[in-house]
């Protein structure tokens, strides 16, 4: 087994690491303490710099202006970008646009690709993904109240959704709605592109998450669709195939999150080690001299290494055998990496004591915002059940001695 990183990827990740250190981490104090809109012009400048460096949209197709990296290569890039909450957005490979780009590329008509995909990859517009409903379990999305009913050449969309990440300022939403109520549960819903300026599209609020509603890209919206009329040509993929399209989105989407979380782990770990080295705890000792902190450092290093190798392996599996055959690996990394990240951030915060609770470091931000990692794109428990089911299938009728 060859773990060598190619010269090309070494060069790219070194450039990205340097950019994150020089250009993005210094922006974080403002990001943490001022309204997001204040930072947007500066973020735009950084995005232009990234485009000049030809590092824009690393994972997106070359035909649309991306770098066309494969998933394993993107895992390495994502690890570097995940070190700052600004990384993925500034490099044009952020959720939820990244997932929407993938399904537009795979299922979009030529017209949809020109209208929505191209400007999205170019970073000229933003989008959101609107599946989860307020009143029904996101863990079982076949239970869905939102409908899209045909009326002449149009669909009329009605429903109440929430947690549409980055809906504030998005130009369009990809909405999951029931189009075929009589069909088999997994063939009832379709994905429909709804421009956000359509009459009846109401962004009710940005949901306060851990005490912070956020705004613009860094927010999660509740949306009320009230007789939203869109042409039928806005359907993405075949009618009734919403869940098939969603699977295409969620598989790679999950691995994208995990790649980013490894970057968060690395940043938190660096901060923890630096603090342990520098914090004098008694006249002749730093925190790094305490056994319990040494144990945390060793455990976190091992956990991060294990999580990272699992992510790279899952990325390699998707590249070689496809997302469907790699379902178990994707589910495993989803809960393993989310929990490793939570543990590493928590330990790093603890080592910082009172300082860890402030916004003077990035740790409290990670602690607040990344708790959701164990819930979105499939809660831990859902993935564990899925993994166990697949494992148990392998034991059916098998003699074990
Ligand atoms: C920060 C954030 C961003 C998000 N972004 C988006 C987005 O952009 N677009 C979008 O459509 N949605 C988004 N979501 C919604 C997310 O996908 C749902 O919250 C998630 O699917 C869980 O659904 P739910 O909240 O309805 O919880 P429920 O389905 O009610 O589940 C609640 C809990 O029950 C447990 N549980 C559920 N099923 C099982 C089971 N089978 N066995 C055992 N235990 C179980 C789990 O512990 C779970 O956390 C986001 C959520 C968050 C927090």
Image: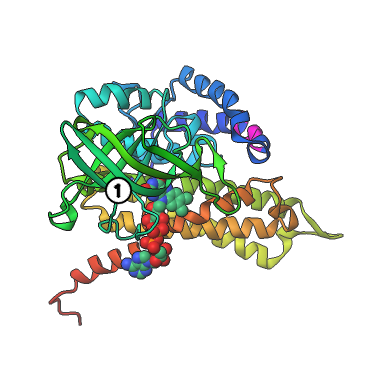
In the picture, residue 45 is in which quadrant? top right
Q: Position of residue 162 (x, y in %)?
A: 42, 49
Q: Is residue 22 left or right of residue 234?
A: right
Who is closer to the viewer here, 349 or 247? 247
Residue at 63%, 29% (x, y): give it.
Answer: 38
Please give left or right for residue 353 compared with residue 364 in the image.
right
- In this picture the colour scheme is rainbow
Q: Is residue 110 visible?
A: yes
Farthest-out residue, bottom: 401
Q: Is residue 183 or residue 333 the one in the foreground?
A: 183
Front residue of 65 and 210: 210
Residue 185: percent from the left, percent from the top? Answer: 18, 57
Q: Is residue 25 magenta?
A: yes
Question: Residue 198: percent from the left, percent from the top?
Answer: 35, 31
Q: Main secondary structure of the magenta part?
A: helix
* Quarter of the image that includes the C terminus: bottom left
The quarter of the image that holds ligand 1 is bottom left
Residue nearest the viewer, comparing 363 with 348: 363
- Whether residue 1 is visible to the viewer of this picture, yes or no, is no
Question: Which stretch appears magenta?
Answer: 22-28
Q: Secondary structure at mark 1?
A: helix
Residue 71 rendering spot, x and y as whole percentages = 33, 39
Name the residue rendered at 38%, 49% in the picture: 161
Q: Is residue 287 magenta?
A: no
Q: Is mark 1 within 8 Å of ligand 1?
A: no
Q: Which residue is mark 1?
A: 251
User: Looking at this rendering, what residue extends furthest in the right direction?
Assistant: 283
- Residue in the picture at 15% in, 74% down: 396
Number of numbered discs present? Answer: 1
């Amino acid at each position: 087994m060859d773990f060598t990183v190619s010269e090309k990827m070494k060069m790219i990740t070194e450039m990205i690491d340097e950019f994150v250190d020089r250009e993005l981490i210094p922006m974080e104090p403002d990001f943490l303490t001022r309204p997001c809109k204040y930072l947007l012009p500066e973020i735009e400048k950084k995005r232009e710099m990234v485009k000049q460096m030809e590092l824009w949209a690393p994972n997106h197709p070359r035909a649309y202006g991306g770098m066309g990296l494969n998933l394993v290569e993107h895992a390495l890039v994502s690890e570097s970008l995940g070190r700052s909450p600004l990384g993925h957005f500034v490099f044009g490979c952020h959720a939820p646009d990244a997932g929407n780009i993938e399904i537009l590329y795979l299922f979009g008509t030529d017209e949809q690709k020109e209208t929505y995909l191209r400007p999205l990859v170019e970073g000229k517009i933003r989008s959101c993904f609107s599946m989860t409903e307020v009143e029904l379990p996101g863990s079982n999305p076949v239970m869905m109240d939102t409908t899209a009913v045909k009326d002449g050449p149009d669909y009329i969309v009605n429903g109440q959704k929430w947690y549409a990440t980055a809906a504030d300022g998005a130009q369009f939403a990809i909405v999951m709605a029931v189009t075929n109520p009589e069909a088999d549960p997994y063939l009832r819903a379709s994905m429909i592109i709804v421009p956000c300026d359509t009459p009846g599209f109401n962004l009710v609020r940005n949901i306060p998450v851990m005490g912070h509603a956020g705004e613009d890209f860094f927010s999660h919206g509740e949306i009320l669709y009230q007789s939203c009329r869109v042409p039928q040509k806005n359907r993405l993929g075949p009618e009734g195939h919403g869940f098939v399209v969603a699977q295409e989105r969620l598989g790679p989407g999950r691995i994208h999150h995990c790649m980013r979380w490894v970057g968060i782990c690395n940043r938190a770990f660096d901060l923890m080690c630096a603090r342990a080295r520098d914090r004098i705890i008694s006249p002749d000792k730093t925190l790094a001299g305490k056994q319990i902190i040494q144990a945390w450092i060793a455990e976190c290093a091992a956990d991060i290494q294990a999580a990272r190798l699992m992510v790279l392996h899952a990325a390699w599996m998707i590249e070689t055998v496809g997302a469907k055959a790699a379902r178990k690996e994707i589910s495993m990394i989803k809960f393993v990496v989310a929990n490793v990240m939570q543990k590493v951030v928590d330990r790093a915060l603890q080592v910082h004591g009172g300082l860890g609770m402030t916004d003077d470091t990035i740790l409290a931000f990670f602690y607040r915002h990344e708790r959701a990692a164990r819930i979105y794109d499939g809660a831990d428990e859902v993935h564990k059940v899925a993994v166990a089911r697949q494992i148990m299938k392998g034991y059916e009728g098998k003699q074990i001695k």
